[in-house]
Amino acid sequence: MLSNIKGVIFDLDGTLVDSMGVWAKIDSDYLTDLGLEVPKNLKEEITHLGFKEVAKYFKKRFNIASSEEEIMKTWHDMAYVEYKNNIKLKSGAREFLEQLKESNIKIGLATSNSYPLLEVCLKSNDIFHLFDSITITGEVSRGKDFPDVYLLAAERLGLEPKECAVFEDILPAVKGALSAGMKVFAVEEHTVSEEEKAQIKEIVHEYIDSFNDLLVN
C-alpha cells in the first residue's frame, strides 16, 4: 500500500481528529451571536479555505464590522478550549502514526488550522512528538484545493512529491493533493455528504473506513 513511499502527510481536522463538528458549531454560534442567519451552503463555501481566508470570507459576505484579525481571535478563543480538552484522535490514528515511525517513514502535517490550535490538540493527544514537520495553509498563497501546502510539506520532509502519500477527508483537498503529484488516501468522515464521498472514491488511491484498516498486527 505504501510501497516506495518515504513520507506521509496528514490533514488534521476530519482526518486525524474528530473535530469537524466543532468548527460548524463555532461558525454557527459566531453568526448567531451577531444576530445573523447561518446560510445552508456555508460549509461547502468555506471547507477548503484556510483560517485567514475564512475570516476574509465572513467579513465580506456578512458585512462584519470587526477586522479579520479580530474575527480570527474570537474564533481562536472559542476553539482553543475545544482543541485542548474535547477533540480526540480518530480510531487507530495513534497506532498508525507509531507504525509509520517504526518503519522510518517521515510524518508531516498539512492543515488549514492555526499553529496554536494544532499544537495544543496534538500535545493534548500526545502525538506532537511524532511529526517531523508541520505546514499550514497560512504559509502559502492558496488553500488546500491547490498543491502549494502539500508541496511545501514534502519539501520540509526533504522528499519529492512522488515519494509522499497524503491522507485527507474532503474532495477539494483530495484534488489539491493529487495535483501535487502525490498518492492520496481518503479517510471516512461522517460530516462529508454521500455524493462527495462517491466522487472522492473515484479518484483516490484508496478509501479507508478507519486507520485500523491499515494496522499491521
Image (cartoon, rainbow, N blue to C red):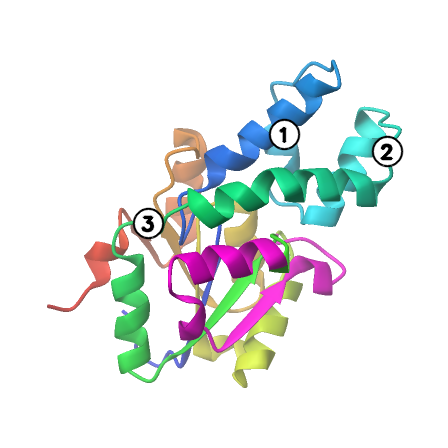
- Classify residue 96 by image quadrant: bottom left
Which one is in front, 182 or 203? Answer: 182
Mark 3 vs mark 1, CA separation in Å: 22 Å
Mark 2 vs mark 3, CA separation in Å: 35 Å
Are circles 2 and 1 on residues that touch, CB within 8 Å? no
Q: Determine whether, in the image, residue 60 is placed left or right of residue 191.
A: right
Which one is in front, 199 or 209? Answer: 209
Residue underneath mark 2:
66
Q: What residue type is labelled 3?
A: Lys
x and y percent of residue 118 in the render?
A: 54, 57
Q: What is the crowding at mark 2: few (fewer than 14 residues within 10 Å), some, or many (at least 20)? A: few
State yes or no: residue 119 in magenta. Answer: yes
Which range is magenta?
116-144
Q: Can residue 104 be seen in this view?
A: yes
Q: What residue type is labelled 1?
A: Asp
Q: Which residue occupies 45% across, 68% down?
A: 128
For numbered disc 1, what is the local secondary structure? helix
Which one is in front, 51 or 174? Answer: 51
Residue underneath mark 1:
27
In which quadrant is the C terminus drawn? bottom left
The label on residue 90 is 3
Q: Which residue occupies 39% across, 37% down?
A: 198
x and y percent of residue 38 in the render?
A: 65, 18
